[in-house]
Image: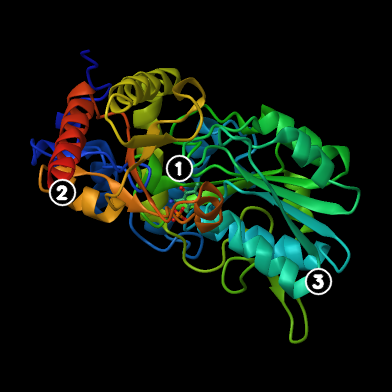
Amino acid sequence: MNIKPLAPRSDFPLLAGDPKLHYLDSAATTQKPQAVLDAISGYYERDNANPHRGAYTLSAAATEAYQTARDSIARFLGAADPDTLIFTRGTTESLNLLATAWGHANVKKGDRIVVTRLEHHANFVPWQQLALATGAEFRICELTAEGEIDLAKLSELVTKNTKVVAFGHVSNAIGTVNPVAEIAAIAHRVGALAVCDGAQGAPHLTVGFDSLGVDAYAFSGHKMLGPMGIGGLIAKRDLLESMPPYQMGGDMIALVGDNATTWNVLPHKFEAGTPNVEGAVGLAAAVGYLESLGMDKVHAHETALVRYATERLATIEDLTLLGPPAVRRGGLVSFTLRDVHPHDLSQLLDAENIAVRAGHHCAQPLMRALGVNATTRASFYVYNDSSDVDALVSAVAHVRERFAATV
Ligand code: PMP
């Protein structure tokens, strides 16, 4: 099989500088194209000032750069109203914003919060802690044997007193792609909020927020070719307008009286303090790069790599692939190799220049249900090709042979 990279490796300085590296950890963070690095340095070389605060030309340039970035990222994610895109540090902060600001204003004792067994800790712990703080009931929707959300169970769990259903677009641990619209419809039947963790969705699939059906969608720039420390929360305007602010300080106020304060309009109400303009500008360049590749092609490329990897890994004795079949899985493979700890395996692979992740993938509730402590995960993106899969498969097979030879 010869699957070529969708994006040339030469566009990515780190990969170009290390031709032997098989980088298979894009679900943790992606490498950055030169276009993103150039956008960041160009911003500092030409436009840097504190936005929104100065009346002078350079501050206006910084404000313009920040707002233009918001416009293009919102467009990329399918939100017609760019002011409903709140910039945050990433998915974790976006979900904490919701659970804290919306949660404490709307959830009380006797209410129910529903999450799923697939969730990353970022979409699990904030809701669990909200339940503990308010006295609400915290319920976890279990999975089918293939690692997919059991929609029949979810329908039963989402009762009239349910205030929020929080779920991921794509599982970072086992790759399950969830039926977002169906889950949102289940939540909306009882008037609950549908909150989607898009950390592994936005980099790989067309999001189309306005027709997706959810009330709020969280994402991280660094998982979609952008810089670290920037991401966002897109939400319905009426939800954001009815919520209290999350953090207080500069920019988010309208009028500060001695005894009371009023809030600024969206998006500023949720962006207290000096914003991460560099991050927004870098992320806008990243989405421009993804748009030039085409998200349909990005998805098709990953699907081809995952199918190929799944077929080849399945031939290795003692290897167990976790998660749904490749046709219903995002751009990653997660597996265990009998009696070889994932940490040992990933170190042995590292010696062959193969970078994979080993561990619980910030999904301990899921690991418990799967009956494993950890898995080894290889995740693919636009710069990967079939030679990365071939290197992974032969190195894993080699570890298995060496291990089998010693017992
Ligand atoms: N949710 C999922 C599904 C993730 O994969 C991640 C990152 N591993 C997060 C949330 C948290 O993202 P961040 O660390 O960028 O806030």
Q: Is residue 72 above or below residue 365?
A: above
The answer to whether residue 131 is seen in the rendering is: yes
Could you tell me residue 320's position as x and y percent?
Answer: 38, 36
Residue 261's place in the image compared with 96, above or below, is below
Q: Residues within 10 Å of mark 3 (few under 14, many from 20)?
A: some
Circle 2 crowding by C-alpha within 10 Å: few under 14, some 14–19, many from 20 = some
Dot 1 crowding, Cα within 10 Å, few <14, some 14–19, many 20+: many
Helix, strand or loop at disc 3?
loop
Residue linked to disc 3: 135
Residue under pointer 1: 69
Label 1 is placed on what type of residue?
A: Ala
How far separated are the C-alphas under marks 1 and 3?
A: 40 Å
Give the number of the disc on residue 26. Answer: none
Q: CA distance from mark 2 to mark 3?
A: 47 Å
Q: Report the residue that reaches farthest toward the front.
A: 407
Instruction: From the viewer's perspective, tell me whether residue 130 is left or right of residue 310.
Output: right
Mark 1 / mark 3, whichever is N-terminal? 1
The earlier-in-sequence mark between 1 and 2 is: 1
In the image, is the residue at mark 2 within 8 Å of ligand 1 by its beta carbon?
no
Residue beneath the point at 33% across and 26% down:
314
The residue depicted at 42 percent of the width and 23 percent of the height is: 299
Task: Classify residue 289 by image quadrant.
Answer: top left
Residue annotated with mark 2: 348
Question: In the depicted view, which residue is nearer to us: 131 or 12?
Answer: 131
Element on which disc 1 rests: helix
Image point (26%, 42%), residue name: 31
